[in-house]
Image (cartoon, rainbow, N blue to C red):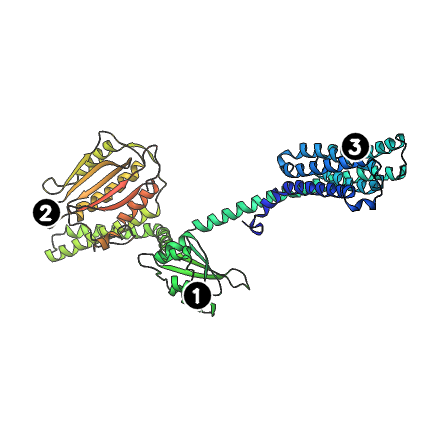
Amino acid sequence: MSPANVPFVHRIRSVPHRELYFFALYRVLVAGLIAALVFSPLAVTVGEPRFPQLAGAVAAGYLVLAALLLLWGRNERWLKPIILSSVPADILVAVLATHAMPGASAGIAMMLLFNVAAASMLLALRYGMAIAVTAGIAIVLEYLWTMLDGGDTVRSLAELAMFATSYLAVAYICYQIGVRARTNQALAERRGAEVANLSEINELIIRRMRTGVLVVDAHDRITLANEAATAILGEDGGTVASGTRELGAVAPQLARRLQRWRKGWEGEKTPLQLSPGQPDIQPRFARLLADGELTLVFLDDATVVSRRAESLTLSTLGRFSASLAHEIRNPLAAINYAAQLLQESRGIDETDRRLLQIIHQQCQRTNGIVESVLGLARRERANPENLELVAFARRFVDEYRLTLSIETDSLEMSADADEMAALVDPRHLQQILTALVHNALKYGRTPDTPAQVRLRVATLERHPVLEVADRGPGIPEAVASQLFRPFFTTSEHGTGLGLYIAHELCRANQAQLEYVGAPTGGACFRITLPAPNGLRPH
């Protein structure tokens, strides 16, 4: 990875490593200059060394030491030991070099100032001040050593005092700079981590959104597509990830509509089907920036919008029907009662009795519609409890048989185990089974043949299930896909709400109601229930 591509946070974390490297590199530079002043023609610039052998030994030894520290002293894990051992060595070398070459004393003292500053910037205040005090004491001791040795001192006490004061001042100032730098570094790391986390969260949210999201540039190239958009685009959506990002090649219809939107046409609201087998989508367009070239394309599932509208319609219908239930029921009951009284009259012929019978049947049908809609409107919360399914199913069958004609229809019950527990509201389960069994007895028969319905208790993938099966003609595939839609019915006497209410009651109990085609003929409705300690079936 090139340096330009290294994340900013990683570059910040490598700062101690680089500081140690440049510190060691500076030491090599200083050692090289001292060696040049001793062994090269540059020696004439500082005069003849007072102690040539000491100067040569110090220059050679310091050059070797600097090279070793350059190789070893770049590991920030050993930051404190490296500095606490190398800087005193720098001070000792500066004292010996100053004593051996008095003409270079000022330059060596100045170069030592950088060592004190770097150590104070990287270490705690007490260590930095201790190194500064050590450096000041060292140059004073070298001055006293020179005087005791009988040599000529080229520096005054005022110069020594200024160097010692400079060491202390630079040490404190550089410590403050180091503290500020470390604080900014920690803040940058926290901000970098927060930015990285927010970026990942945003990416995850966009990727897992159910609404498809595309980002398209001015040349109709797709620069971003989330999982929902890729799924909506179908087989061509795979080319988005593999490098073919031309919107016109992936979804020509969508590209044409985008072009018209850019020209100011806002009148197209019809859904599109971008690929076979995928739901219709309703595209929406928005600019990423007010004056930018990137366009956000939102691909909404039109079926979801339709379901929301349908849900709103049902909710409105439920509230409306609840308010009108009393006004509808009273006149309906009066009409029904009057029809029954007329049927008891002796002066009515058979034709009029047939008309009264039609009135009575239609009153019952209208009352059933009102009851179904009211049941949908006042649907209560489920109160699930641990229920023993086998015993419940057996009681249900025994009670329901009382309403059947023994000579015609039959209702049987079977179970794969003696006991089976489930988590469900018994009242809701009673209502669901009643609707399913009623439909099976009514529609699950062939002409001139009694209805035969079986209620079976079993397990499927460790979930308890109830199956209501008949031996009728079955349900066509086109009809099966719409069974649980409200108000959908194939019978002129049906309301289209029975299966829908049963389906909604199953959802309220975290259960699943589905139609299962029987291979031997007939229809089968399966209720998959949560186990007592299980989760919702998928």
Mark 2 crowd level (few <14, some 14–19, many ≥20, 10 Å Cα)? few
Q: What kind of element bears circle 2?
A: loop
Q: Nearer the viewer, residue 529 or 350?
A: 529
Mark 3 crowd level (few <14, some 14–19, many ≥20, 10 Å Cα)? some
In the image: residue 372, left or right of residue 92: left
- Tell me the distance, in whole angstroms, between the alpha carbons under discs 2 and 3: 112 Å
Residue 235 in percent (x, y) is at 34, 56
Mark 1 or 3 closer to N-term? Answer: 3
Mark 2 or 1 closer to N-term? Answer: 1
Tell me the kind of residue under disc 1.
Answer: Leu
- Tell me the distance, in whole angstroms, between the alpha carbons under discs 1 and 3: 75 Å
Tell me the kind of residue under disc 3.
Answer: Thr
Residue 117 in percent (x, y) is at 75, 40
Q: What kind of element bears circle 1?
A: helix
- Tell me the distance, in whole angstroms, between the alpha carbons under discs 2 and 1: 59 Å
Q: Which mark is residue 134?
A: 3
Q: Which residue is mark 1?
A: 258
Q: Nearer the viewer, residue 255 or 87?
A: 87
Q: What kind of element bears circle 3?
A: helix
